[in-house]
Amino acid sequence: MARMKGEHARVTGLKELEAAIAALPDKLVKKELRAANRASANIIRRESKANAKARTSKKTGRLIGGFAQRQRTYQMKRIMTVIHARAPHAHLLEFGTQPRYQPNGKYVGEGPALRFMTDAYNDKKGEAAKLFKQRALEGLERQANALGKKSKSRR
């Protein structure tokens, strides 16, 4: 199966976010960053699904109905979300196929690359990064306020 090298949308210049992350316990930070990452990945997943609907025939319903995402967290520094199509032929539609021939030499066609997921990522990565920053800051601020209220009530 062909794999693309990882694409990254990096959000930089977030001094407030870094300060909030340093001040909160890892468990709360992970919870809020995962939620923000999930929300931003949903933008790309929805766009991928819309592209697949527009670019494929109605016979590929299994492809359209099967977009999912998985998250992995690495040492609290990186959260990776993988958006994938569950259909076993999705990579053939995304990347296309070379000309195919039967053993007797008869040409049976080739498939053009539809790039429904790659184009969705390229079109929506800026919007997803902005949403991630917004949701992460809101969530971390909410957790910091909740911790502040807990510490005041214990006094």
Image (cartoon, helix red, strand yellow):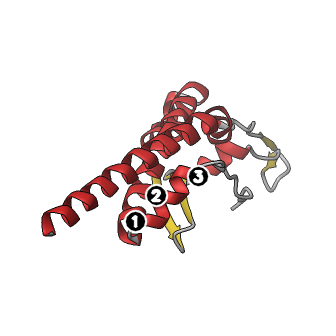
Q: Which residue is mark 3?
A: 15
Amino acid type, residue under disc 2 in the picture: Ala
Q: CA distance from mark 1 to mark 2?
A: 6 Å
Query: What residue is rendered at 61% in x and 28% in y?
Result: 55
Q: CA distance from mark 3 to mark 2?
A: 9 Å
Q: Is residue 76 visible?
A: yes
117 left or right, relative to 81: right
Residue 94 image position (x, y, % from top left): 67, 43
Residue 150 image position (x, y, % from top left): 19, 63
124 left or right, relative to 138: right
Few, some or many residues within 10 Å of mark 1 (<14, 14–19, 20+): some
Identify which residue, 86 or 43, lies in the foreground.
43
Q: Which residue is mark 2?
A: 20
Identify which residue, 100 or 80, lies in the foreground.
80
Q: Which residue is mark 1?
A: 24
Q: Quadrant of residue 109?
A: top right
Q: Is residue 72 above or below residue 117?
A: below
Amino acid type, residue under disc 3 in the picture: Lys
Residue reaching furthest right?
105
Query: What residue is rendered at 43% in x and 57% in y?
Result: 34
Query: What residue is rendered at 25% in x and 56% in y?
Result: 146
Few, some or many residues within 10 Å of mark 3 (<14, 14–19, 20+): few
Residue 95 image position (x, y, % from top left): 72, 45
